[in-house]
Image (spheres, grey):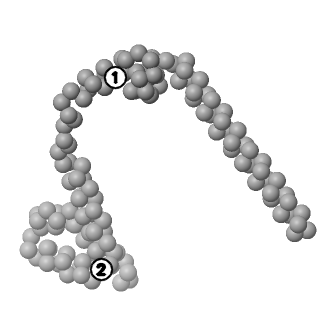
Amino acid sequence: MTGDRDSRICAEVQQNLPAWRRGELGRVRRRLLAVHLRRCNDCRAEAARQDDVSAGLAALAAPVEPPPEGLLDDLLAAASAPGIAGRAAVPARGAVSGARPALSLALLVAGAAVGTGAGYAGWRSARAVGRRVRRRRA
């Protein structure tokens, strides 16, 4: 019976953790949560997990430094350059923009064929090794 009561208390404490962190709880409830957190490892771990999530979200919300002035113009100029320099500047432009769909499709098919062949070869060799091991044991 005590375990059931404790789980209900833990559920209520964990439900109130965000409001407790924001300082939105009254003095008595805040004190009860603090006492419970000192005694309960599970709720303390949940509070730490929520702190980590809050810190991660705060880091995501931090302002991002803008790119250097003229970077986009430089990249576009390099991408439109003829020859290998232009192709190296934007290696995935065919796959992304559809400028070269036949080449993109050919590379995808070739990659799928190589991956399938490698998987099949691995499966065959593992099967052969398993047969040899079974023969030696017999």
On screen, residue 14 above or below 58: below
Is residue 58 shown left or right of residue 131? left
User: Which picture quadrant has residue 56?
Assistant: bottom left
Identify the residue at image location x=79%, y=53%: 127
User: Which residue is nearer to you in this view: 79 or 49?
Assistant: 79
Name the front one of labels 1 and 2: 1
For the question of whether residue 124 can be seen, the reply is yes
Instruction: Report which residue position mark 1 lands on.
Output: 78
Residue 15 seen from this side? no
**Going by the image, does 102 lie left or right of 116?**
left
Give the class, few, some or many, for how many residues have Cα within 10 Å of label 2's Cα (few <14, many ≥20): few
Position of the N terminus by quadrant: bottom left
Kindly identify the amino acid type of the residue bearing the numbered disc 1: Ala
Residue 45 percent coordinates (x, y): 31, 72
Residue 37: x and y, percent?
A: 24, 77
Kindly identify which residue carries mark 2: 40
Q: What x and y, as percent, mark residue 61?
A: 20, 48
Q: Residue at x 80, y 59 (%)?
A: 130
Q: Is residue 60 above or below residue 4?
A: above
In the picture, measured across the screen, residue 1 lies left or right of residue 115, that is left
Of labels 1 and 2, earlier in sequence is 2
Kind of residue sitting beneath label 2? Cys
Residue nearest the viewer, comparing 58 with 122 = 122
Query: In the structure shown, which secondary structural element does the residue marked by tag 1 occupy?
Result: helix
Q: Position of residue 36 (x, y in %)?
A: 23, 79
Q: Secondary structure at mark 2?
A: loop
